[in-house]
Image (cartoon, rainbow, N blue to C red):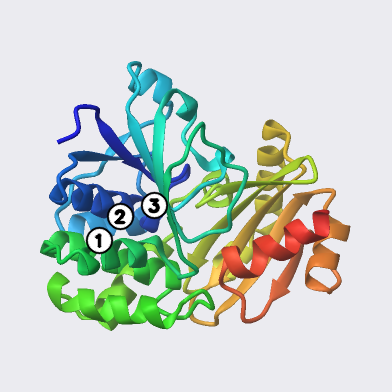
Amino acid sequence: MSEQTLYVSGHKSPDTDSICSAIAFANFKTQMGTSATPVCAGSANKETTFILNHFNVAHPQIVENWETFAPNGGDLFLIDHNESKQIIDGYKSMNVVGVVDHHRIGDFETDGPVYIHMEPVGCSGTIVANMYFDNNQEIPQTIAGLMLSAIISDTVLFRSPTCTPKDKATAEKLAPIAGVDIESYGLDMLKAGADVSDLTNDQIVRTDMKEFSEAGQTISIGQISVMDTTELLAKRDELVAALEALRSSNNYAASYIMITNILKESTDLLYSGDADAVVSKAFNTEVKDNGVFLENTMSRKKQIVPPILGAMK
């Protein structure tokens, strides 16, 4: 066993993959002989809370700043992210030893060589699950449930264009171990996460929010997925105002929120800031009332971030 504490963490504004894959990977490392502890950068959202309750798994400890949480340092594995602005604050006080991710390579730097495992799949949970398979490691039922849930979440029950055959095949192998039916459990899980009735406008625009930088400017892009967008779009002006408050308070060049319709597989993209030209160029369409409607669009990673950052160059 390693003498130094190994922590495994997902990104800020944690989503299901960020939390569930951190727990699963920490368990994998522990089973392989290196004791590891999962942590997270904030409270679980409704979807993730449903998952943790369903499989009776404790919420990981929340860490907002590494220098405060671990003043003596420790080893750190990053899961589901690699961009510096998405990492928990104070991470340079830690010894970053590895990254497991399925996103683009950002501006993350280390002092020395580290273990990196990145694949163009739909979910970090897919990568972690196959680490268990490839190393002939037994998967506890709860861990299988968490990894399956992460895949369902990130691929939106295989509807997202980021979903690959490997994601679906991995989910099908995990389902009998987890003891659930993929379709019925997946719909229940997504419905739990789609309940926005008690969220404030500020909470809505900050849902699953990530920061990105390009050409010396930083932007934020959040995403909220629902079964019906009518309720959210009815208060469009209020959400744009909340985006502007978010943008100005953080000095972002622009702030975006994807309002994604799970059933129709489409997204209304709202934004604040001087971004009309960027959005128009990114999606080759006219903008109206600080937003655009995008058919067949569900993936921030594949369909929103690349064109926006490209238009900012």
- The amino acid at mark 1 is Leu
- The amino acid at mark 3 is Ser
The answer, for residue 216, to whether it is visible in the render is: yes
Pick out the residue farthest to the front.
Answer: 113
The answer, for residue 192, to whether it is visible in the render is: no
Which residue sits at x=49%, y=29%?
89
Q: Residues within 10 Å of mark 3 (few under 14, many from 20)?
A: many
- N-terminal of the pair, mark 1 or mark 2, is 2
Name above or below for residue 310 compared with residue 76: below
Q: Quadrant of residue 73?
A: top left
Q: Quadrant of residue 269?
A: bottom right
Name above or below for residue 240 compared with residue 70: below
Along the line of sight, the residue nearer the viewer: 162 or 255: 162
Which residue sits at x=35%, y=64%?
127
Along the line of sight, the residue nearer the viewer: 108 or 89: 108
- How many numbered callouts? 3
Q: Quadrant of residue 54?
A: bottom left
Quadrant of the snapshot with the N terminus: top left
Q: Residues within 10 Å of mark 1 (few under 14, many from 20)?
A: many
Along the line of sight, the residue nearer the viewer: 11 or 231: 11
**Residue 110 percent coordinates (x, y):** 52, 35
Rounded to the nearest angstrom, the CA distance separating label 1 from label 2 is 5 Å
Quadrant of the snapshot with the C terminus: bottom right
Left or right for 121, reference 176: right
- N-terminal of the pair, mark 3 or mark 1, is 3
Q: Which mark is residue 18?
A: 3
**Residue 304 percent coordinates (x, y):** 66, 65
Q: Which mark is residue 146?
A: 1
- Under tag 1, what secondary structure? helix
The answer to the question of whether label 2 and label 3 lie on touching residues, with beta carbons closer than 8 A, is yes
The answer to the question of whether label 1 and label 2 lie on touching residues, with beta carbons closer than 8 A, is yes
